[in-house]
Image (cartoon, rainbow, N blue to C red):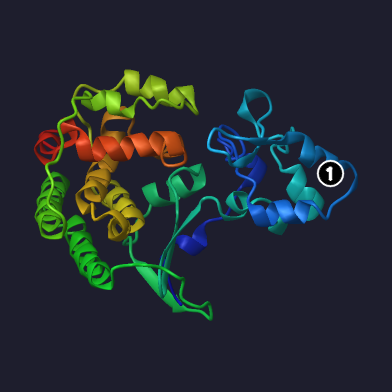
Amino acid sequence: MKFVTPSFYKDFKCIAGECPDSCCQGWEVDADESSLEYYKTLSGSLRKRIDSVLDKDEFGNTVFRLADQKRCPFLNKENLCDMHIAIGGEHTPYTCRTFPRFINDFGGTREMGISFSCPVASDIMWNLIDPFDFVSDLNDLPPSLNEIDAELYFKLLRARSKAYDIVQNKEMPVSQRLLALLHFAAALQQEINPYDEGFGQTPFFDVFLNPEVINHEWVEKVKNHRAKPLFPNDKVCENTAMYFLFRYFLTAVEDRDVLSKVKMAVIGVLIPAYFGNDSWTVHLWSKETEHSDINMNRYKKELRCNANLSVKALAEHLF
């Protein structure tokens, strides 16, 4: 299998108990099947402790019931994981083992990156001076089973390379790059699966008031948004857009909606411009939105159906 990661991927290191916004606080963690099977082999106080906090969410998934202040029941006073300490990180739930990494499999290619939802990862990408580029390696893993439309996949792969070029074209100001990116995606969408952009009327800033609140600091940032955008420097804007293109663009092979993926990249740049010009702001948005099924499903619907997130409407926020 071909393995693709950003060139800075290897630089990420979890700071554990020193983290200013622990990933073990604020959201429920799924207990995946393989982990549950392992826990059945345990005995003693740890087994009893695990069994005592297992629960079902509204979707029927097995989760660890949160303690006070939405803390994981295994997060101790030093902000370290008691389960990790007791049985090793390799036996913690899949989400815990992989976070803040995201994985996209496309048959013979696996793409893996780090998410803005982690403050450390957010700082890395926000402060990246080198080009946001990628490295490829080969490993012995077999291709993943899939039903990918190969023709569409390779069309999107070529198109994403073009999108990268647009975003990283330093001969143009960022606002012009993002506008060109939107028009490129709109034309590509017409080739792949034409559709009307939307008819919903959720006001632009209300899009960011998610139904599931993870951190009230984000709610306050939305309420206190700037009247006009103040964009970070060009390199930060470039890095932010590249993150979203890398993470989401090729997933259009599943729903044939590439325009929404590109809108996400443009809005990603608008988030610090309106809500706070620092990596912490993007981190808060990411943790609030990208890691909540409820919030993310709503956001995807807004991207496609909300007239206030149309190409024309977003273009007005860039100038």
Give the residue drawn at x 25%, y 68%: 157
Find disc 1 in the rendering and name its residue: 46
Q: Is residue 249 left or right of residue 218?
A: left
Image x and y of residue 10, in percent = 50, 64
The image quarter containing residue 146 is: bottom left
- Residue, far right: 44
Number of numbered discs visible in the structure rendering? 1
Q: Is residue 180 left or right of residue 256?
A: left
Q: Is residue 192 left or right of residue 47?
A: left
Give the residue drawn at x 18%, y 35%: 309
148 versus 126 height, above or below: below
- Type of residue at label 1? Leu
The residue tagged with tag 1: helix, strand or loop?
A: helix
Q: Nearer the viewer, residue 131 or 178?
A: 178
169 versus 220 height, above or below: below
The image quarter containing residue 68 is: top right
Image x and y of residue 29, in percent = 60, 41
Q: Nearer the viewer, residue 218 or 34?
A: 34
Q: Nearer the viewer, residue 35 or 233?
A: 35
Q: Is residue 269 left or right of residue 278?
A: left
Image x and y of residue 83, in percent = 76, 46
Tell me the crowding category of disc 1: few under 14, some 14 to 19, or many 20 or more residues within 10 angstroms, Cα based: some
**Image quarter hosting the C terminus:** top left
The image quarter containing residue 21 is: top right
